[in-house]
Amino acid sequence: MPARLPLERLLVPVRTIRSRPGAVTLARHPAALVLLPPAPSRADWIALGPEFSALQRAFVAKRRRPGEIFTRTIGARAETRVAVAIVDAAMSPYERLLAAGKAARAALEDAPTRVLLLAHGLAAEPADAALRAGVAALQAAAFRLPNFKAERPVAPLARIDLVARTRLAGLDRELASAAGNNLARWLTALPPNLLDAGAYRRLLAEYARRNGLKFEFYDERHLHRLGAGAFLAVARGNAARDAGIARLSYRPRGAGRAAVCLVGKGICFDTGGTNLKAHAGMLEMHTDMQGSAVALGCLHALRALGERTAVDCWLAITENRIGPTSYLPQEVVRAHDGTTIQVIHTDAEGRMVLADALSLAAATRPRLIIDYATLTGACVRALTERYSGAFTNRLATRDAIEAAGVASGERVWCFPMDADYDTDLDSAIADILQCAVDGKGDHILAARFLQRFVPREIAWLHLDLAAGQRRGGLAHVGTDVTGFGVRFTLELLAQRWPRAQGRA
């Protein structure tokens, strides 16, 4: 049962309704998501119309606070399930997305085929921001991750009707971001028997063909010729010789080589290798390819927006298996750029495959490289799953990176990147240790390791996706797999990061 890309259902169509929703409009919608301020005026309720009088009575029955949601069923001609989210101008983007996400899931609880979205009683800018959050939340809630139950699935949400006088500002970017996030979550959630390295390669080739992208796959034989020994060490224990590094290239008309490279860790299953994981640590390791899925989701969103910059997506795809041919602690391997690495722990495989992927990407001389990886437990322990860790060789831009996290609702925290951390990676027999023995600050040391494979003249950002998986979801995304990184990347690139050219 091969996995099939859900490209046609990544997004629910959005239609703009330019008039106030009366009784007839309300009756045509089994569900509605309504965004209101904490204290709408009497004039606001009058303008909303008598069809919402029952909602007004429920609303004023108690004091309402920003972030709160509640549901009511209203309508004289038909019953419409209305989920209300209380929002105001002082809310952060994350808080706004969180409230919209709760309300969206409540609105879609009975699986409606059409939903009405409106904001009322808010000033223009807060209303637009709330509506964008509502669109993102409904798209996330309506999308279905892979499911293999025998019962017949219910009809999907077919349309979102957005009440607005004009086309919502920023709607295209919101939809592109939602599509990229949905694609990333779908890939990440696939079971490991449906997304091994060979199946991933076939899906990527299909994706590239359907989206007009150039696709190359550097298989193990090719990587041997290139000297990509760090990647090949990890792939050595696999039963099949199907691992490799995929390159998908987006070239808008007139563009030359890629200015931006997106690099992703694609470990389809991680046993830990010779340093075998325990049961609890291995259970979700089919999601260890989430970095590659997020990189592809970012590429999907940029293409959907018609980005005028050429972009390459480099995905390091393999498994990390245990077996008689698996790589071992204390091996010395040579990476693509010639760096020799002393292996310390075979479960630090992510930085090994990324080293060669980063080196290959850097050889194309882009202006910017961003890499994505569920890389270290240390980052999760430092931040929990609410933030992701950010590391850069442009230290003067750390405030801008964190600001993009705030603005996108996908929050990141920049960790130190001081050069003296490198002493913890000194090796007596190789150019660098793969990792330290004791694991202290492993997220920082992993970033210092990776930076070695990116020339100083290329701006580089590493995202350790601590927030890639969180029980109950994060912000507007209600699934444990969050797809974290697409919204953040679009915001960061929209700011033309890095503007300040700080040195490493």
Image (cartoon, rainbow, N blue to C red):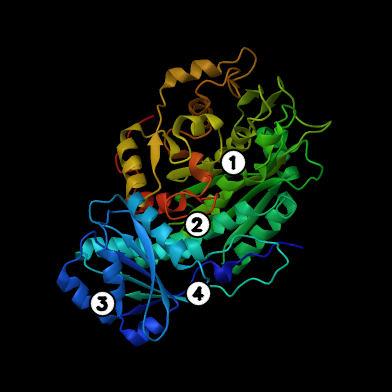
Distance Cα–Cα, label 2 vs label 1: 23 Å
* Residue type of the residue flagged with mark 2: Asn
Q: Position of residue 210 (x, y in %)?
A: 60, 68
Disc 2: which residue: 181
The image quadrant that residue 173 belongs to is bottom left
Question: Do the CB atoms of the residues marked 3 and 4 lie less than 8 Å apart?
Answer: no
Circle 4 SS class: loop
Q: Which mark is residue 357?
A: 1
Distance Cα–Cα, label 4 vs label 2: 22 Å
Q: Earlier in the sequence, mark 1 or mark 3?
A: 3
Q: Nearer the viewer, residue 265 or 80?
A: 80
* Residue type of the residue flagged with mark 1: Ala
Viewer-nearest of discs 2 and 1: 2
Q: Quarter of the image containing the C terminus? A: top left
Disc 3: which residue: 165
Could you classify mark 1 by the number of other residues whose Cα lies within 10 Å: few (under 14), some (14-19), or many (20 or more)?
A: many
Residue found at the very far top of the displayed protein: 428
Disc 4: which residue: 112
Residue, x 48% and y 61% (percent of image)?
140
Above-or-below relation of 253 to 27 = above
Question: Do the CB atoms of the residues marked 1 and 4 lie less than 8 Å apart?
Answer: no
Q: Does residue 227 appear in the picture of this structure? A: no
Circle 2 SS class: helix
Viewer-nearest of discs 3 and 4: 4
